[in-house]
Image (cartoon, rainbow, N blue to C red):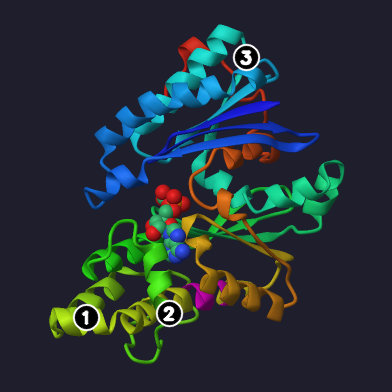
Amino acid sequence: MILAIESSCDESALALFDPARGLVRELISSQAAEHEKYGGVVPELASRMHLSALPLLLADFRDELAQAKTIAVTRGPGLLPCLSMGVTLARSLALARGLPVVGVNHLRAHVHSPFIAVHAQDPAGFAAARAALLPHLAIVVSGGNTLLVRVDERLRLTVVARTVDDAAGEAFDKGAKLLGLPYPGGALIEKHAQQGDVRKFVFPRGIPEKADLRLSFSGLKTALRYQLEKMSDAEVAAAMPDLCAGYQHAIIEQLVAKAGAVLDLGGYRSVGLSGGVANNRTLRARLTDAALRRGLPMRVAEPKHCGDNAGMIAFAAWADVGLPLGAAVAPAASLTVDQV
Ligand code: KG4
């Protein structure tokens, strides 16, 4: 059994994973409402909130704690003052209970998160079920990253496409801010877009050349700013659904085009989607359609495993060959954040 701790940004989370059964328990405490007041995550505030939330979550895990044989913790990427809180708790628990501690890369965990449901369906048959899906194209779209990653038969990861500037989630959040919507604005843009017409406002598609696998979202945000400068507040309010629809469409079309270009190079047997932006229903539908049209099964991470969560950290500590249990084990007291 693996007890995992996640504290890379503004969610404090704990999860317990049993390889024979799946995720036994997951708890998450979100700070989003607090950071909304400041229009973004304040690292110092976030780390203080982890300091108070993590022990409360741990107290809630008191009954299951004795079953944990390994402690897993997010080692990065993330905000250093926040990561330190989780790593300190992991090291303390490991030291007190004489357990090994494994550091998990947050992005690798996102890559593996669509496989949590594959494991849950049939834990005993997981190895064969996953092998049938490899090589796999993992599309990771979060607030901090946008990556298309090839996962080969030996679970080696290769980044095949990435953004050269803003992440997709960042584009949603910065666009939302320009539109006067609260942080984080991705879900609100999606909500307004549902009533909008994607043809009313046409925004640029980053790097449109099919052969160029790089993604870019910063020009899109500038285009929105220029568009809004031409409009009065009342016009913006009236056109909010159409503005959101056009803006969201430009983000999604770029992701669908680049994912399609990568898949057309061949050699994939499945596609995965994860990260906070994977909550977007239009994106899920468009990418699922792109995969199915190429005859490939699509695996989308469950909504609770799209944003930051400890379930994916526990799962990756077990399922990712890049993190063999035991290899990262060292005397807990001698580990630094980077080494964990
Ligand atoms: O994975 P995550 O927690 O990102 C990082 O912390 O890096 O996801 C947060 C991101 C935010 O940018 C948020 O606006 C975006 O995911 N997001 C969405 C939706 N729900 C969350 N973006 C578009 N549509 C959504 N429904």
Of the residues under marks 2 and 3, which one precedes in the sequence?
Answer: 3
Mark sitting on residue 249? 2
Q: Is residue 65 visible?
A: yes
Badge nearest the viewer, 2 or 1:
1
Q: Residue furthest bottom?
A: 199
What is the quadrant of residue 135 in the picture? bottom right
Q: CA distance from mark 2 to mark 1?
A: 18 Å
| Kind of residue sitting beneath label 3 | Leu
Instruction: Name which residue lies at 52% across and 61% down.
Output: 279
Classify the position of ligand 1 by quadrant: top left, top right, bottom left or bottom right: bottom left
Q: What residue does disc 1 label? A: 236
Magenta stretch encompasses residue 258:
yes
Which of the 4 quarters of the picture holds residue 179?
A: bottom left
Question: Which comes before the other along the chain, label 1 or label 3?
Answer: 3
Which residue is under mark 3?
A: 99
In front here: 243 or 294? 243
Q: Main secondary structure of the magenta part?
A: helix
Secondary structure beneath dot 3 equals loop
Mark 1 residue element: helix
